Image (tube, rainbow, N blue to C red):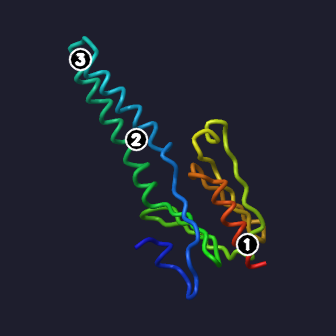
Amino acid sequence: MSYVENNLLVGESMTYRARLHWIIFLKGGLFVLAAIVALAYLESPYNQYLGGGLFLLAIVYLIIPVIEYYSNEFAVTNKRLIVKTGLIRIDSLEILLSKVEGIQVNQTILGRILGYGSITITGTGGSRDPYLNIAEPLEFRKKAQEQISIIS
């Protein structure tokens, strides 16, 4: 069971859940591709070493994003915004919808094309919490604003 599901209040239900975008796996995927090319097409006695080294780099560059992908949660409920990041050291933001002042979305051109970006949640008291590489950040903001308008 997820962190969000374990921490729902009585009468609270999840209305939207966001995840990290697949773009976080891109660097590791490029190393895998480079390793395959090195092993298959290079005409050198050292290509197996180069390919093996690139596969090791790919593993390193894929482990961290896999852990991040499965350990980060972003949810809108009918009462709160809940964000949990981390696996061993957990950072969580649980803010009542009535205390949300704004949700800023930043997207690059590539982010607009592929559907990812960063969100910054601003709460009363000036707290600003940015989260990067969220899949469909505009949809997250829209769902949060819908819930805020319902409780207002």
Whichever of callouts 3 and 1 sits on the residue coming sooner in the sequence is 3
Q: Say whether residue 56 is left or right of residue 64.
A: left
Q: Amino acid at mark 1?
A: Ile
Looking at the rendered structure, which numbered label has been put on residue 148? 1
Q: Which residue sits at x=63%, y=54%?
A: 137
How far apart marks 3 and 1 lie (CA) works out to 60 Å
Q: Amino acid at mark 2?
A: Tyr
Whichever of callouts 2 and 3 sits on the residue coming sooner in the sequence is 3
Pointer 3 residue? 46
How far apart marks 2 and 1 lie (CA) works out to 38 Å
Quadrant housing the N terminus: bottom left
Pair 2/1: label in front: 1
Q: Which residue lies most toward the bottom here? A: 10
Whichever of callouts 2 and 1 sits on the residue coming sooner in the sequence is 2
Quadrant housing the C terminus: bottom right
Q: Is residue 127 above or below residue 32?
A: below
Question: Disc 3 vs disc 1: Cβ atoms closer than 8 Å?
Answer: no
Residue 28 location in percent, x, y?
40, 38
Q: Assess disc 2: are there few (<14), some (14-19) or many (≥20) residues with their C-alpha within 10 Å of its C-alpha.
A: many
Residue 45 or residue 135, whichever sits in front: 135
Pointer 2 residue? 61
